[in-house]
Image (cartoon, rainbow, N blue to C red):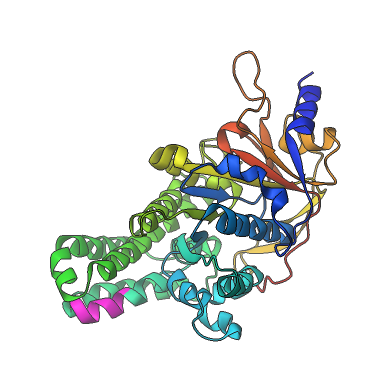
Amino acid sequence: MPRTVLADWFREHSSTLTTLDPEQPLDDLEGLREIVGDARVVAVGEGAHFVEEFSRARQRVLRFLAERCGFTVFAMEFGFSEAFPLARWLLGDGDDGDLAKVSRAAAEWGAADLMHWLRHHNRTSGHPLRFAGLDIPEAGGALRPALEPVAEYLREVDPDALPLVDTALEISDRFLRGCGSGATAAPAWAGLETAEQNKLTAVLARLLLRLRAVEPLYVSRSSQSRFDIARRRVEAACYTDYMFQASNALMSGRGLAADLSVREIYLAESLHWHLDHAEPGTRVVLAAHNNHIHKTAFSLDFGGGLTTLPMGQHLQRMLGQDYRTVALVHTADHVPEMYPDQSAAVGFTLAEAPLEPAEPGSVEAALIDAGLADRITLTDLRHAPRDEQGAPLINGLRFQSSHLSTPVPEAFDAVLAVPTVTRDRSVRF
């Protein structure tokens, strides 16, 4: 019975979109307007990384929210520190061919098409979008992108504190050389002597405490804005250091419950930081994996315990109804998957993974049962069906090549589904 109920409900409440082409007319996305309402932040997810259709769908949604709803900032699962030079390029600095020079990560990790499109959009549309990064450096695979700009800042405002940064970089260079992501950094960190691990943590903590203690002095020698950015960069280094230990413990079977939430709170607080430092009326489109924008806690297959309190849960607590989420899913029978591989530069190999049939009660199964699997659809989940006890009947969706059991209408306000999956060929690792 629930399977039939869900199929009928999706058939009645899903609108069909005409295209994924971001340059085509946007009228078919008007259903988003009511879902978004007056929210300050709208998160647009993806059910798997490195999928071309998800990137194109995001571009259309981003354009709709900018041109028709007045959104002015595009924030992304991208390094807070690394985003500043990229943001300037996206607003017109330099030449069109400079992306790799400005941001190696954007050029090589599947964001090249999106960034070139955004630069063109900012130049031609009349609705430019400022870019903002939220994440720890290289998603936990480096410290230099955060600490090198801090060293430049300290040379001006407090040269005596430079040895703290130098010590942190000296230690980090012993294990982070050649690391391309958090997947390689955590086991490399485990190879350090315990005394070196502890020294890195201590020196970063001391650096952060010094910045907090002498803020008036630093501001008098620079500006409040420059100080705030430097402090957030040092915080990024501290959170990254914590993630080395948390990720290694998880992979070793010794992880604490929800320990990976350290990265999630950094993402959420970075978004709040950008709102605090923006002009009144700023509205943000946030792009990140479905699991990051998810409004409720969940568990993945790491021993069955609570894995993550996601960014979206923190943002829901911070912003309430000012935070809305749109999950992106697909109904294809395969997806690009990241398989752990310590011999690879980024700690994993990307390959196509065949999928099991969609789980009953999942978004994908409901779309298939409703005869919508071959269409691009947008479904408003805010009034999704529930059982007699009030539990949502839609109880899961795909996560990469796996299934995530979760009360979907409590985690997301809407879902946009695509029928096909194509690996993003711009990925260069």
Q: How far across and how far down the image is residue 245, in percent? A: 42, 55
Does the magenta run of residues contain 153? yes
297 versus 134 height, above or below = above
For the N terminus, the image quarter is: top right
Residue drawn at x 43%, y 64% as measured from the top left: 80
Residue drawn at x 51%, y 56% as measured from the top left: 71
For the C terminus, the image quarter is: bottom right
Front position in the image: 118 or 106: 118
- Is residue 406 visible in the rendered image? The answer is no
- Is residue 61 visible in the rendered image? The answer is yes
380 versus 107 height, above or below = above
How many marks the image carries: the answer is: 0
Q: To which quarter of the image does residue 151 belong?
A: bottom left
Q: How far across and how far down the image is residue 203, in percent? A: 26, 65
Front position in the image: 32 or 367: 32
Q: To which quarter of the image does residue 63 belong?
A: bottom right
Q: How far across and how far down the image is residue 355, in percent? A: 79, 46
Does 153 sit left or right of 411 as displayed? left
Front position in the image: 252 or 263: 263
Q: How far across and how far down the image is residue 104, in percent? A: 55, 77
Q: To which quarter of the image does residue 136 belong?
A: bottom left
Does the magenta run of residues contain 215? no
Q: Main secondary structure of the magenta part?
A: helix
Which region is colored magenta? 150-157
